[in-house]
Amino acid sequence: MTTKTQDRPLFPFDNTFAREMEGFYVAARTAPARSPRLVAFNRELAEELGLDADALDSDVGARIFGGAELPDGATPIAQAYAGHQFGHFVPQLGDGRALLLGEVVDRNGRRRDVQLKGSGPTHFSRGGDGLAALGPVLREYLVGEAMHALGVPTTRALAATLTGELVQRDTVLPGAVLTRVAASHLRVGTFQFFMARGDVERVRKLADHAIARHFPELVGADDRYLRLLEGVRDRQAALVAKWMQIGFVHGVMNTDNTSISGETIDYGPCAFMDRHDPATVFSSIDRNGRYAYGNQPYVAAWNLSRFAETLLPLVDDDRERAIARATESVEAFAPAFAEAWIAGARRKLGLATERDDDVELTNGFLAALLSGSADHTLGFRRLAEAVLGDEQPLRDEFEDATALDAWLPTWRARIAAESRDPATVADELRLANPIYVPRNHRVEAALDAAVERADLAPFRELLAVVVRPFEERPEAKGFERPGPKDAEPYVTFCGT
Ligand code: AMP
Ligand code: MG
């Protein structure tokens, strides 16, 4: 069954992956959803995609986003990928609970994937049901949209749809589908799938596809495969630097969750940390802290090495030379990350100029947050008051302000040396340091209300807060605070 209104198709699909990349996917179909109902629809994103938001914010939209009907022009497919999961290589993963409807070119000329996640089993489901429960769908919606508002490259949420079906997990839960929009769903694991099969020609084809899509300036360049590696390196470095700045813990940085485009992808066990601590881990399955907050840059570099391995035969016919060149490129991850990190840190500290000791200054503040058991988000945010002369709100965030007190004079002297108007610096600090992030207890409360009581009001309220993270406002009072200190340690779970 297909759907369209008037003459214009609802989605102006142009599906290059389905058309050009045969052998990289398997055709898929959606599970029947008896009574799909939209619970969230992202009108702003629909408009950015050039879609008719009014037409889609409707029963027609619910049927499409719930997987009950295929829009005209869709070519539903499940993409193949492999991946290193917690360091162990799994040669076949693939879209086991998702399918790509197709691609649209948005208002800015950028090609975007439209994917349904939780729409039923596919060739890659490996015994899984291919379904998603409402809670994780809403979680990905909330956190992904918050990340976008925080200025972090990310996949986006176009819609969350209740299917009207039940999903069996530990308990029986309402089933839902997330409509996910991405620059693409190419992952490091996509390359690994074909490399693991020794299919160099398919790796080459995939690399050329990725270059055309994400690095068009490299099309036709002689050294394009090495430069693809370097492009992915720089995007991952910039991405993870942003995560570090906002206290985001991805939680499952497997190579199948590492996107070639440099977007954050897969909001399973992710969470924002409250108290600043590099050892922070939320995921129930991350027992050794492999994906702890402070490890994320190292893991990104490790994942990049896995990507480099897939490209070796393309980089140079001589394997030794290929390894030498790729190694050099991968080793430049650390300086690329350091550069992105310090640039962000300067903004977070209100610095307009660059000095060599800025790294030390930043590390001094992070160490003060750690030793003072201070909240990451509010610790930075309260610098805006401090720069205007009121240090009390900042000090109030610290259980122990000893290290903070030792640090503050150095920071004040550094700011003073720039001779800028404190009001300007405070404004900049408030634009660099969010006041609202999706606090774990708020996320849980919103999901609980939706799942247990079919009450979407807390979800909507929290979403409205976190999509404007920098602007303090009276109606959002209390949303800046972390959950109660005596609460159980926050634990997150994989699986959507
Ligand atoms: P993720 O944890 O989201 O990165 O997923 C890892 C792999 O498990 C991917 O290949 C998913 O498609 C697959 N997967 C996760 N949940 C399900 C499910 N409920 N049914 C089928 N496949 C699943
Ligand atoms: Mg994944």
Image (spheres, rainbow, N blue to C red):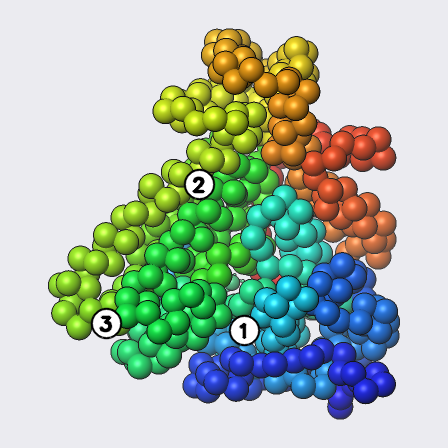
Q: Residue at x 74, y 51 (%)?
A: 447
Q: Residue at x 73, y 42 (%)?
A: 468
Q: CA distance from mark 1 to mark 2?
A: 34 Å
Of callouts 1 and 2, the N-terminal one: 1
Q: Which mark is residue 96?
A: 1
Of callouts 2 and 3, the N-terminal one: 3
Q: Amino acid at mark 3?
A: Pro
- Residue 338 at what x, y percent from top left? 38, 38
Quarter of the image for the C terminus: give it: bottom right
Residue named by callout 3: 313
- Residue 120 at what x, y percent from top left? 64, 76
Q: Secondary structure at mark 2?
A: helix
Asked whether residue 142 appears in the rendered view, the answer is: yes
Residue named by callout 2: 340
Q: Amino acid at mark 1?
A: Gly
Quarter of the image for the N terminus: give it: bottom right
- 213 shown above or below 2: above
Q: CA distance from mark 1 to mark 3?
A: 29 Å
Tag in front: 2 or 3: 2
| Residue closest to the eye, 7 or 454 | 7
Callout 2: 10 Å neighbours few (<14), some, many (20+)?
Answer: some
User: Mark 1 near ligand 1 (CB under 8 Å)?
Assistant: yes
Q: CA distance from mark 2 to mark 3?
A: 30 Å
| Residue closest to the eye, 39 or 407 | 407
- Residue 381 at what x, y percent from top left? 64, 27
